[in-house]
Image (spheres, rainbow, N blue to C red):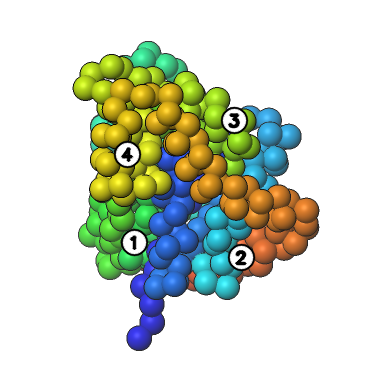
Amino acid sequence: MSKKILLSGVKPTGAPHIGNYFGAMKQFVDLQKDYDGYVFIADYHALNFIQSKKEMEKNIIGVLLDYLAIGLDPEKLVIFKQSDISEHTELAWIFDTLTTMPYLMRAHAFKDAEAKNKEICVGTFNYPMLMAADILLYSPDIVPIGSDQKQHVEIARDTAEKFNRIFGETFKLPESKIIEEVATVPGIDGKKMSKSYNNHIPLFSEYEEIKKCVMCIVTDSSGGVPKNVYAIHKLFRSDEELKKIYKEKEGKYKELKELLIEDIEKFIAPLREKRKEFEKDIPKALAILKAGSEKAKKIAEEKMKEVREKIGVNI
Ligand code: ADP
Ligand code: TRP
């Protein structure tokens, strides 16, 4: 029996943090033995945020090295770049024609921007349509993500259903795969860890940087257990172990933070070293990406042929 398919992507908008890792990227690695599938670099999505050739190029290579360093195996999952497959933007356009403005106005990302009175670009408004195309072209069973992306997968499902209803059965409906305990990893201020809130611990940080981040974790003095420190610590040790340690060291915030620094360092050091190894041979990493894009292209081309046929432009 053939394996089920997974698909997910990360935007090249800067160095990933431990929230990205535990919420999403670790799942790609853990699932690759049981699933076939696709993990890609969402560079056209990142264009909404990164508008500099130099930075975009650097960030794309960055995500590629991150993927390899965390242990994604190109023999098991296809690693590719979104912009190499023009079918993504082509299908996104077709979805644009089926989707109403009020429907997309209900998306969280749009509502947040509106609430902040931000002037957003059309690309940000349409973001979920490109994401629906990313997903539906490859007929995945599951889309491993953090909880902030759940609505986007629901939009992809709705879009697939709508297309299927109008033009006949074409797209498989995907399920999002979220791990509850790490659905929203908190940052050093207790809010959702995010690059944009500057409350993150970078995944490949050096020891000094880890130390600086941990020392900045906001502690309040309620009950002797610093809850923001504990919440991050939970990523590295079991609740059982931590309860004992935090009881023994009740109120000793500095010692608890020092232990957290050591635990994070123990976890990050091997990843950091692996990334440095891959960094020594960027042409080799780029060749992996190119080969992946060639494989993905074949699947996307086939699906688009079916879509063009269904909508009646293949005369
Ligand atoms: P950011 O919010 O830092 O810009 P991205 O949007 O690039 O992160 O997210 C990449 C992946 O990491 C997505 O699947 C997203 O759901 C997941 N993710 C991001 N932040 C967190 C978090 N704090 N906890 C769990 N998962 C997260
Ligand atoms: N929107 C996702 C994020 O911000 C990245 C992404 C783009 C994605 N296309 C996707 C994730 C398709 C899963 C599937 O993190």
Residue shown at 38%/82% (left/top)?
A: 2
> Mark 2 — residue?
292
Label 2 vs label 4, nearer the camera: 4
Q: CA distance from mark 1 to mark 4?
A: 37 Å
Identify the mark nearer the N-term, 3 or 1. Answer: 1
Label 4: how many Cα within 10 Å (few below 14, some 14–19, many 20+):
few
Q: Quadrant of residue 282?
A: bottom right
Of the two numbered discs 3 and 1 in the rendering, the one whose residue sits closer to the viewer: 3
Q: Which residue is mark 4?
A: 245
Report x, y in % for residue 54. Answer: 73, 34
Asked if disc 1 is less than 8 Å from ligand 2, the answer is no
Q: Tell me the quadrant of the picture where the N terminus can be found.
A: bottom left
Residue behind mark 1:
142
- Which of the labelled discs sits on residue 126, or is there none? none
Q: Amino acid at mark 1?
A: Ile
Dot 1, crowdedness within 10 Å: few (<14), some or many (≥20)? many
Between circles 4 and 3, the one closer to the viewer is 4
Give whichever of discs 2 and 4 has the lower sequence position: 4
